[in-house]
Image (cartoon, grey):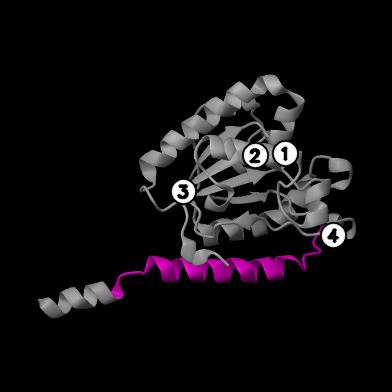
């Protein structure tokens, strides 16, 4: 009996080891994806914007596509929209390092136009790969394009906000894109309600104290 107990302990997954493995797998996916030339956006991009954050994050934040500043730096949400996103996350007790942040499309569409259907189709495998590695519990979808793409619908923001929507094995919440909030400050109250709802759900399903694993810091 004693031997079987020790065997069970030895075979138990080690959280730190799994976190390091996720970080390594994510780094490998990032290196591979940066060579992508599957669609026309590869010809106009300055940088492939893979995404960044905690490889063991329980919350994955997904926007639409990189903008000019993201294209210039290769990092997601670094302009005014990114600064606002950081404030939104902090308002519900998430630091940027606690979550993973990415986009549907990894390359900037010219003039910040909406991504085309074939561009989304080419880029989705990279996002799905990220989700398989990170295994978040919750996805926060920023804006109508991201929400319609992931949830595979054509619903309005009003029809998607204010509730949890199950997609695959993930619990999804929809709110306004920070860029839309900068153009429409009156929508900020609705966003605040959305992220509070998401945070309450997060606290209900994610054990306290595991939002950030320092063993994955590089």
Q: What residue did someone put label 4 on? A: 42
What kind of element bears circle 2? Answer: helix
Residue 6 in the image, given as x and y percentages of width and height: 19, 77
Q: What residue did someone put label 3 on? A: 137
Query: Which of pointers 2 and 3 indicates the residue nearer the eye?
Result: 2
In terms of depth relative to the viewer, which is nearer, 99 or 38?
99
Query: In this image, 53 relative to 114: left or right?
Result: left
Residue 151 in the image, given as x and y percentages of width and height: 59, 40
Query: Which of pointers 3 and 1 indicates the residue nearer the eye?
Result: 1
Q: Can you say which quadrant of the picture contains the N terminus?
A: bottom left
Q: CA distance from mark 1 to mark 2?
A: 6 Å
**Which one is earlier in the sequence, the residue at label 3 or at label 4?**
4
Q: CA distance from mark 3 to mark 4?
A: 31 Å
Circle 3 crowding by C-alpha within 10 Å: few under 14, some 14–19, many from 20: some
Circle 4 crowding by C-alpha within 10 Å: few under 14, some 14–19, many from 20: some
Whether 28 is among the magenta residues is: yes
What kind of element bears circle 3? Answer: loop
Q: What residue did someone put label 1 on? A: 81
């Amino acid at each position: 009996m004693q031997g079987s107990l020790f065997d069970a302990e030895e075979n138990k997954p080690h959280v730190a080891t799994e976190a390091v493995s996720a970080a390594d797998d994510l780094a490998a996916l990032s290196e591979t994806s940066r060579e992508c030339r599957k669609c026309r956006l590869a010809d106009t991009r300055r940088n492939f914007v893979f995404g960044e954050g905690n490889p063991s994050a329980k919350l994955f934040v997904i926007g639409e596509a990189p903008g000019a500043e993201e294209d210039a730096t290769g990092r997601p949400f670094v302009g005014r929209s990114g600064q606002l996103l950081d404030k939104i996350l902090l308002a519900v007790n998430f630091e940027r390092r606690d979550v993973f942040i990415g986009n549907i499309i990894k390359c900037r569409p010219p003039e910040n136009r909406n991504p085309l259907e074939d561009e989304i189709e080419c880029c989705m495998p990279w996002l799905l790969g990220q989700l398989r590695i990170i295994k978040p519990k919750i996805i926060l979808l920023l804006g109508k394009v991201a929400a319609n793409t992931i949830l595979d619908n054509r619903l309005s923001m009003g029809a998607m906000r204010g509730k949890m929507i199950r997609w695959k094995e993930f619990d999804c919440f929809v709110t306004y894109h920070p860029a839309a909030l900068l153009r429409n400050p009156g929508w900020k109250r609705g966003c605040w309600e959305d992220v509070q709802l998401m945070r309450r759900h997060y606290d209900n399903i994610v054990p306290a104290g595991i939002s950030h694993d320092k063993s994955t810091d590089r």
